[in-house]
Image (cartoon, helix red, strand yellow):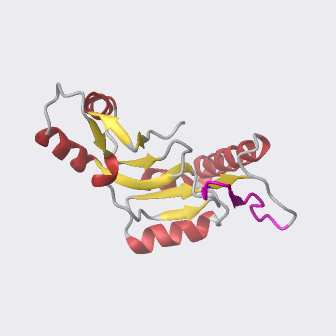
Amino acid sequence: VDVVVLREYETIQQIVSLLMQTSFSGYPVVAEDDRLLGFVLRSSLVLILDEKSVESAELINMLDYVEEFPDIVNWGNPVARSFDRFKSSGLQHLCVVDTCGVLLGILTRTDFAKLCQSGAEGVEAIKHFIHQKAAAVSEGQAVFGEDGEDMRHCEINEEGEESDS
């Protein structure tokens, strides 16, 4: 399942469409290169609609409405550790990023509930999770060394911007 995201600049119509087509409590805001910039709550998007004309073609800077430091976890972290953090902090969502800050997914209470099921359902949920992670590695979304560490790193290009390598 693809993660529903907002880009740094969105039109009112894109926001309306998103709110009508989904029921999520919040959405990650990502840059053009999919690096996580923040997380915006659904209630903040509704507030934008209260402030602006729905017919407006104006581009909205989503960074004006985001939580600048959303709760994140590196995707190489053990699931059990992520669950402990999620549970102890009372989080609603946990953004999963790679070592370069690229958004890979979001863990929610529903995801953890599936992973914590007993019996065959729990085993199947864990197998599915492991399969998704293995597929990401095989598609080159992550590169792992012998010790399981994510070997991909970011480099600074001539313009002073990070790039994946």
The answer to whether residue 39 is above or below residue 136 is below
Residue at image x 61%, y 47%? 125
Q: Nearer the viewer, residue 100 or 104?
A: 100
Quarter of the view holding residue 18: top left
- Confirm whether the magenta stretch covers residue 133: no
Q: Position of residue 77 (x, y in %)?
A: 64, 66
Q: Nearer the viewer, residue 131 or 29?
A: 29
In percent of width and height, residue 108 lies at 45, 54
Q: Residue at x 63, y 48 (%)?
A: 120
Above or below: residue 145 compared with residue 120 = below
Left or right position of 52 against 13: left
Residue lying farthest to the right in this orientation: 146
Q: Quadrant of residue 78?
A: bottom right
User: Does residue 56 appear to the left or right of 3 in the view shown?
Assistant: left
* 158 and 26: which is toward the camera: 158
What is the residue that sits farthest to the bottom in this orientation?
Answer: 88
Q: Measured from the top left, where is residue 127 in percent x and y?
A: 69, 48
- The residue closer to the viewer here, 122 or 108, is 108
- Please give the name of the residue rendered at 67% of the width and 55% of the height, measured from the top-left corner: 158
Relative height, residue 114 to residue 148 (above, below): above
The answer, for residue 25, to whether it is visible in the render is no
Q: Is residue 160 magenta?
A: yes
Task: Judge from the rendering whether residue 90 lies leftward or rightward of residue 15; answer left or right.
Answer: right
In which quadrant of the rendered image does the N terminus lie? Answer: top right
Magenta highlight: main SS: loop
Q: x, y percentage for residue 54?
A: 16, 29
Q: Magenta span covers which residues?
A: 147-161
